[in-house]
Amino acid sequence: MTESKLPVEIKPDRKVFNQYLAVLCVNIISLAQGTAIGWLSPFLPLLISTNSPLNAPVTDIQATWIASLLCVGAIFGTVLFGWSADKFGRKFSLCMAALPLIGFWACVAFGGFVEVLYAARLLAGLGAAGVFLLVPLYVTEIAEDRIRGTLGSFFILFINMGTLVCFIAGTYMSYHVT
């Protein structure tokens, strides 16, 4: 019968800790993207109503465009951020993917016209393409094989948490606070 010797002291693997830390940090942008995705759901009824924070209530066709333009922005963002990742690297491109999201929230906060919301949703789509392309790419490049699946799952977790945060915040906060 063989005896196995247990180590006297178990030290945390610093390399694994650093990978988890890097993935948590990079997924902050995934959380932000989740809020941009989920923003429309709690506020569309308000935008359509006579109490709309915009200069006029949004029509059904305008609401459809507001919802759809995220996908249009993502088409252009996919090409842009795919090229950017190869040309400038993953980290720099991830930082640049935050800019459209900042623009999205600025448009939502300060725009009083439906056309500004169109631009906001295009920007959210542009950022979405960057996030959906670059975060998984970055994580697979830095993660060891034995923890790649776990680290990769953080992406979907953070997207969904961001969406949920927006659903909850939208229920209890005013349009301009969120």
Image (spheres, grey):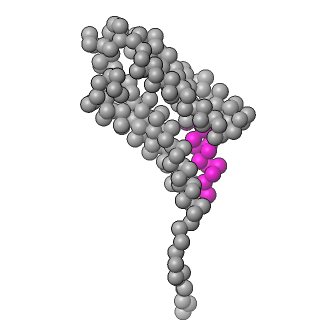
Q: Position of residue 132 (x, y in %)?
A: 55, 36
The image quadrant that residue 129 belongs to is top right
User: In front: 92, or 152?
Assistant: 92
Q: Is any part of residue 76 visible from this angle?
A: yes
> Which residue is drawn at the image coordinates 32% and 9% (left, top)?
57
Q: Quadrant of the C terminus?
A: top left
Q: Position of residue 128 (x, y in %)?
A: 53, 30
- Above or below, comparing residue 166 to residue 150 in the picture: above
Q: Quadrant of the N terminus?
A: bottom right
- Marks counted in the figure total 0
Residue 139: in magenta span: yes
Residue 105: in magenta span: no
The image quadrant that residue 66 belongs to is top left
- Above or below, comparing residue 11 to residue 80 in the picture: below
The image quadrant that residue 4 belongs to is bottom right
> Which residue is drawn at the image coordinates 32% and 22% (left, top)?
175
- Above or below, comparing residue 164 to residue 4 in the picture: above
Q: Position of residue 106 (x, y in %)?
A: 46, 22
Residue at the outermost right position: 87
Q: Position of residue 136 (x, y in %)?
A: 58, 43
> Which residue is drawn at the image coordinates 35% and 11% (left, top)?
54
Q: Is any part of residue 41 visible from this angle?
A: no
| Segment colored magenta | 132-144
User: In front: 99, or 50?
Assistant: 99
Residue at the outermost top position: 56
Main SS of the magenta segment?
Answer: helix
> Which residue is drawn at the image coordinates 42% and 14% (left, top)?
111
Residue 84 falls left or right of residue 18: right
